[in-house]
Image (spheres, coloured by chain):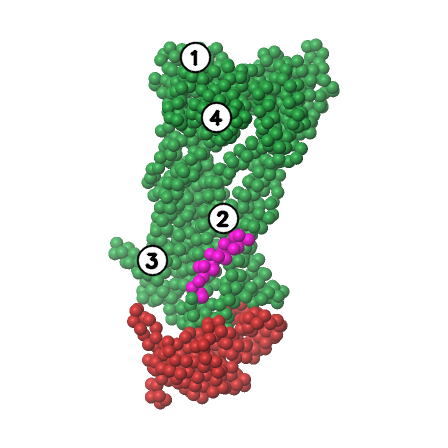
Chain colours: A green, B red
Amino acid sequence: MRRLRFILTLAWRESRASRRRLLLFASAISLGVGALVAIGSFTANLERGIRAQARELLGADLELSSGRPLSRRIEGILDSLVRTGARVTRRTTFQSMAYIRRTEGTRLVDVRAVGPGFPFYGEAITSPAGRWRGLDSTRIAIVDTSLLVALGARIGDTLVIGSAEFPIAAVVSEVPGHVTGGMNAFGSQVYIPARDVPATRLIVFGSRVRHAALVKFDDPRDARRLKAKARAIFTRERVSSQTADDTQRELTGVLDSLSTFLQFVGLIALLLGGIGVASGIGAFVAGKIDTVAVLRCLGASRPLVFAVYLTQAAALGLIAATAGAALGVATQLLLPRLLADVVPANVHFALEPGVVLGGIGLGVAVAVLFALRPLLEVRLISPLQALRRAYEIVPARARDPWRLAALGAVAIGVLGLCMSRNEIPQVGLGFAIAIGLAVGILSLAARGAVALARRVTRAPRFRARWPYVARQGLANLHRPRNQTRSVVIALGFGVGLLAMMYLVEANLMSFVRTSTGSVHGRPNLVFIDIQRDQEDGVQTAVLGAGPVIQIVPMIPMTITAVNGRTRDELLRENAATAPRRWTLFREYRSTFRDSTVSSETVVGGAWWHGRGEAAEGRPYPVSLSTELAADLRVKVGDAITWSVAGVPLETRVVALRDVDWARFETNFFAVFSTAALERAPRTSVLLTRVDDAGARARLQRAVSERFPNVTSFDVALIQRTLEAILDRVALAIRFMAILSLGTGALVLLGAVAAGRLERIREGALLKALGATRRQIERILLTEYVALGALAALVGIGLSMGGGWAFTHYVLELPFTVPAPALLLTFGVTALLVAVVGMTASREVFRRTAMEVLRDV
Amino acid sequence: MLIANNLTKIYQSGGQPLTVLKEVSLSVEPGGFLAVVGPSGCGKTTLLGLLAGLDVPSSGTVSLDGQDLAKLGEDARARLRGEKVGFIFQTFQLIPTLTAQENVQVPIELAHSRTGAQGRDGASARALELLARVGLAGREHHYPAQLSGGEQQRVAIARAFANDPRILFADEPTGNLDAATGARVIELLVELNRELGTTLILVTHDADLAARARTTLHLRDGAVVPDGTAA
């Protein structure tokens, strides 16, 4: 106990001269801790919110929905529920064109026709307030603010949907049963009374409609019980069922993945900070040789000296981690405002003590773990060094067991941290391996870059040609106690993450632009759900504004049997041989034609001749995409029975196609011969290109007025929406990248502080030898620009590797390098490091040349 | 060559003024050899700093080769040092990231990069010549850490003569060397002083070393002690 007190006292007194500098080293972990605390707390707040609001989010205890009107069997179940006291309401969802008479604005909207009583839980918030219940009794529309903005409309205007007119009664800001923002942002929402749907005359053959029944039970637990009991029926009747619990699970699942990813980046930022701590402490210890030697002379044992410095490291880690946690809580306060659009539930700020304490603990652990190895060096300082000065510590044996133990402690520590932050051990292990890899690659890259700089500065040609100030500046990168490598690692990671984000985004956006028709000649306006008798009319309307690039018939159908075995039989087969479920349950929208199109190639079998007639009682030829064939487990020659509007259609697979789905054209899982489907009920899709945005809007309005059921998509609008969604996701990641860059800057500041004495001494020496302030400035500037350039080189190199891998393997898109942007990144990084470094080095100029005579 | 009048230097120490140098006056002829001696903390190093223009006095003037240092700014003083002054330090003060030859070249190259003059080959030849002169031929590509203390100090001497200084300041040049090496270093300095006519100002607390100088200035508690009364 007395010994502990002595250690604490000595640690406190000994730190006097260097507290500020030590705090700077330790602060490298603050941002990492801050990020972890902010993300962890925010996620915890959000999950709490979702748990509390799960029923409000769904608007009911149970939702049954289907792409077709609910079957009699399901209606029977609903009736029996009502008899036992449950309440049921409806919601029908479909897309349609909507326009405002007064402004003539047209837009594709998501129509949500809701029955009386909807929602059972939560409250729809309208402005003016209290207009929602009007849907129960009057023909009105309640719309998204975005619709008013897009159409230049206001409350009171008349909104035309199909053949019906709806006065806009209010705008809605929050509706249960609809998770706002995020991925649903394609169309604006319009709420109308369910009983007015027939008046729109939009529900016709081929319309994409979602029918839902929402149930409120007396005992909400009945929802889960019913779902468990009737699961088989629901599957057979193609009804998907969702309880409030499911909603909660889905939302928290998505959140967990996002939060896990962000925490992973936060953890790396923290570990980079740890590397900064290690290198700062290393430089610090090197400057403490005299003190340690004197302490040893005065009788301090090696463990005691080690304990004194470890105590200092732990204490500073605690201070830095606490500051980081405070920063994290402050960020947590800001996040809900920043993410209001993306977040599915209301988030109420609550301090999460577990998360905050965990973050602080993590910070201290990282500081101590990473300080261990450099602190071990104090053991090697001999008391003799107080008498005879040596300038470097005797290097330890490479296999010093203590040093290996310290490295082992770091490895086990990182593994422990990762495992403790993940519920699934494999994920934790994967994290640890990924972090090890990331830091390892960074470390190797940094080592390589520094070695390269050293070779260059020592090359005779370089020495002969470059001016002295430049050579001296570059040589400074490997001055004794330099921290070039850790700065390059930490900054390189931040730059790399930012640049990789940018690369992936740029490649994705350039793909979106090419595939959505920004490129000349590609279709940019699409009309769907064109009925057979409307084909000529729509074509005529379109031809006034642009070419008909493609008009493609679409026939909805399902698969009823494969090779004579019915769907139920197939489902009972074991998983290895049975077709994948989706292939048997989806509704296919197929087409017929006589030949292939440019986005597909036949890779198996052969295309049919001409119209592909079949003799009486013989199957028609069909071609499947390779993906469908694989999941349906069929090959060329197999027989498939389809149901087209209830009529069975026998086919034989004759050709397999490789389809380039990425092209924004009409592509199909199954293509039939003309003879097979030309008489089947169908709708058509028409693709055109109209370059002028105004002309595009006028054409959409003209078609929508004449043919209310025909829906059109302005592809440019989709592109903008996609961009907006990507931007939001990118925001979170960019935030983390900037945070890592901040950690890099702190490590840089620590490095400058660690080399402070060397810099002052060197500056004074050069002044004594006749160097002007300007010359010294240039030397330092060269050093920092070179440091920034190395970090940028490593970061950009990594980002190209990572960006390529992500684009190639995950997005499966071609990868191009936007060179000007990367060059700019390079320049900005070098400049940033130069500014930070020069600012932190002001002391060199403030001190006089006299320092060279003093033994600083 | 070097004239100092009533040099006084006062530092603020813990809020209290601390006079480290009291009205010191001296004068050294071109080619002269002055030893400043005195016990630790008597103000020797402070005096040297003021004479070389590394620092400015609280009062009094220094004239170096006819130039009043008080009238020059920091950069102008640096330029003057670069052209006319050489330095040797107790702790050698070599730049660890440069080789022996590069260390010697630093003053020449600083001057070149100031004036924009070319002729690095000249700098290189001059450095090799000086290294040979101090007995380090063949060691020019070694880094300071690869040299012994005596060798490092010889590199420092070569560097001090690199720009043909009119005056050389040496601060305890043998303080970190064993007796034999120290003696050789002093021989070298005296020899160069004699051959090149460089004025030599030497700070030391070594009486034997001081005895070799033509003139000796005794300092105690920041003030000059008349000859013969120094302890």
Residue at image position (34%, 56%) is: A312
Residue in the foreground of this view, choosing between A466 and A410:
A466
Up the image or down, A230 lies above or below A856; here it is above
Question: Is residue A835 covered in magenta?
Answer: yes
Give the SS element for disc 2: helix
Sequence-wise, the earlier of marks 3 and 4 is 4
Q: CA distance from mark 3 to mark 4?
A: 65 Å
Answer few, some or many: residues within 10 Å of disc 4's Cα (few below 14, many 20 plus, some between 14 and 19): many
| Amino acid at circle 2 | Gly
Q: Residue furthest front?
A: A102
Foreground tag (2 vs 3): 2
Name the residue beneath numbered marker 4: A189
| Amino acid at circle 1 | Ile
Question: Is residue A702 covered in magenta?
Answer: no
Q: Residue furthest left?
A: A2
Q: Which mark is residue A494?
A: 2
Sequence-wise, the earlier of marks 1 and 3 is 1
Q: CA distance from mark 1 to mark 2?
A: 57 Å
Name the residue beneath numbered marker 1: A77
